[in-house]
Image (cartoon, helix red, strand yellow):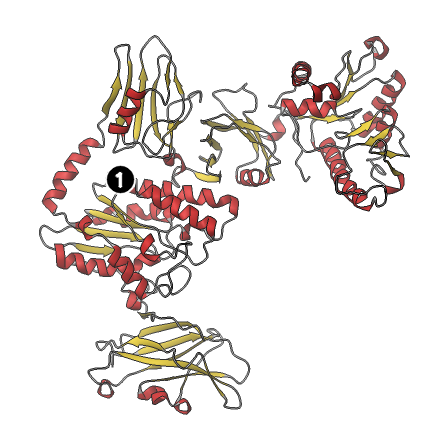
Amino acid sequence: MYRFQVKAPTQNGEMIGIVGSISQFGLWDIKKYLPLQTSGDRYPIWWVDVEIDPSTLTDSEEKIEYKYVRIDANGKFQWECEKETNRWIPIEKEHIGSKTSTIIVDDLAFGNVHPCPYGYLENAIAPEPKTETYSQNGLKILVLGSSVAMGCSAWLLNGWANQLGQTLKEKFGHQLINRSQLGANVTSTIERFASVVVPEKPDLVIISLSLGNEGLAYCRPHDRRAVQRRYESGLQQLIKMTQDLGAIPVIGGLYPNGDYNPEHNWLLRDTHHRMLRWGVPILDWLDALDDGDGGWKSGISLDIAHPNTAGHKLMFEAINLDIFQIDRERRSQEQAIKSHSSTTEIAIYGDKYGFQVFANPEAQTLRIINNSEYDYNITSTWKELQEALKRKADLTFGTSYIAKNDELGTVPLLSVGFNGMIENTVKVPIGVDLQYCSALKFFAPQNAEILYYDGHLGILKEGDRTIRIINESEEEYNIHPMWKEIQAALAAMPAGVYHDPANPEAPFRTMMIGEQGLESRVKAPVKSTMLLKYKCKLSEINRIAILPLGDRCAARMLLYKMEYDGPAFPFDLARSTNLGDVTDMVVNDFKDMWNPAYLHYNAIDNRIYHSKWSGLSFGHEVEDTDDPANNMQPVHERMRVRYSARAKRFLYTLEHCDEVLFVRTGVTNRDYVLDLIEKLTVKCKDKPFRVLLISKQTSDEFRDIPNLLHYDLHFSPDWMYDSQDYWMECTKTMKEILESLGISSQNLFWCPPNP
């Protein structure tokens, strides 16, 4: 029994028929078509069950050819494709005439004729693997993969794995069982390993998964590296689980996807080249299947994700059968050797002072002991050590190694180059016993959830309230709320304050996470890893906001150098020489600050002046492409967008912080300050605030003004632009002032870019 089915959307009165080379199909007479049926719950799928009489077939017939036709309400016929292109299926004589074994012929879409047919036995998409006997010296081989490993899209699911099993049984007496699963990825496969693989006690496990099932083709561009790292680390974990079981791991190689673009293809090849150097046998398929751009070669795929019968045949033919040329006796001997080596460290290097390096190539670990009286520096020029690492340690190239027991997070990562040597300089302190392992272990799905990874910076969720940050690059990473991908990624963590318990007072190691994600700045040093653990709710700390009040951009420039700056506020890039104007603007929520009716361009000064507040002007709003003398409309629109957003941030910060420090630079007078303090008291609605006034005038003028702190200093933005030394000197002074007020990166309120 055959059931032919095709997806064919139709109009009212239309139907689908089938015409072909056998009598039931009209022997190519279109008027004798066999009609298909559909139903409300299955439309637009049309189908027909066909019983084929064996007596109507000749011994020489090996296939049935046919086409679908569309018949409209008037009886007019439309072939689905050109005359030369036919669909076909092989004749399965053992199933002909059988009413208990129906072959589903899945022809996918009307008009889309594939070079190879796809069919499977009804209810056999996920068949229970057969338990067969094998020769006394043969091995038990288990395939652990996804739909491609199951044989999906091959005729009768006779995919590469099934073909391999038949050949291995005939050639070596091995038994192959297939425990693959539709849609499997590294995470689901790790989860089912104990229940599916362990009870079988296999001698060899073929792990065949794809980057496609990890979501590479459809994830956001900034998540692609994370998908790649999760896949690689998950495979490494499955390899280790297989080895721990006493079995030989074999990796099923990567294969194309019809929706990969050039960046996907680059990542595909990058992972492929890395897998070839893992020291694990691999079924190397990519070159046999790939069209050079990450897609399938012509004619070998049924859809974007699956090879057809011809593609599965290519996959089988690309397998090096020598991988499986091993008998049980030799397998036992090798296992005994590996079992011993998996727990044995070998000496890599040692000197008379007490500096020693050990490695376990099987476990991919490195141990560095410094019992000497000196700090040591591992450098790329230390030839004796580096050559020993290359010869004996077998470190994974292109991978960072992290010290698992470096509780203080003070020891850099080890970067391993393509030659198996350590590329970066690492200081090894006196008295340490550092135990390094591959960073891939930290990224493995069962150890962490990857929140973000760009190829250098990794942010991992290790448990419900623990974050690990790994920086594998040669640059310090500045992790901050304006980095929208990072901000959004950290929304996966419970809201609260996270800190580094090993360095609780260190700057920029306190991470504040709100409902929308990251709300503070964190620094990840070069070649480093650190753990941030949940400390308390956000409401349990007093978060202080710094809001500049002009008169020029000095405050903004100093906060920038201190890295306390966030998105811009209204006065950051404007000039406001009159404190009375500033007070009026703040009280009125900046209404009219960017009103075109009050903005006037001065061509001589190349500035925009404000007629309502005469002390207000703008020097950064006219761009080279503008013609402000003749058309101010683009400038007005730009200012509306910029300053409305800056005003919203100012007011949002004022409402949501726990305390405010307003910062004003520039000379003013007592009356203006008293007026400012009085109106801020109303504006802040009983919220504690202080005004830091920095101006080159005596503090006596401002004595006894509540909430005011005055410093007789001059911070000139012009001099800062001219001299980096002056800028840094002013920054040092400003930082000391803020620290004296109890403000640091640990309690600073960071305004989100888009409140």
Query: Can residue 660 be seen?
Result: no
Q: Quadrant of residue 376?
A: top left
Left or right, 469 with respect to 270, comes to right
Residue density around tag 1, few if under 14, some if 14–19, many if 20 or more, within 10 Å: few
- Return the residue nearer the eye: 189 or 83: 83
- Return the residue nearer the eye: 709 or 353: 353
Identify the secondary structure beneath mark 1.
Answer: loop
Q: Which residue lies under the disc numbered 1?
A: 279
Left or right, 598 with respect to 163, comes to right
Q: Is residue 100 above or below residue 715?
A: below
Left or right, 714 with respect to 35, comes to right
Q: Quadrant of residue 116?
A: bottom left
Q: Is residue 25 above or below residue 367?
A: below
Q: Whole-percent x and y of residue 25? A: 35, 86
Q: Is residue 374 above or below residue 124?
A: above
Quarter of the image that includes the N terminus: bottom left
Left or right, 648 with respect to 411, comes to right
Residue appearing at x 82%, y 35% in the figure: 590
Quarter of the image that includes the C terminus: top right
Q: Quadrant of residue 597?
A: top right
Q: Which three-letter amino acid code belongs to the residue tagged 1?
A: Gly
Q: Whole-percent x and y of residue 659? A: 71, 25
Residue appearing at x 37%, y 60% in the figure: 297
Query: Can residue 663 be seen?
Result: yes
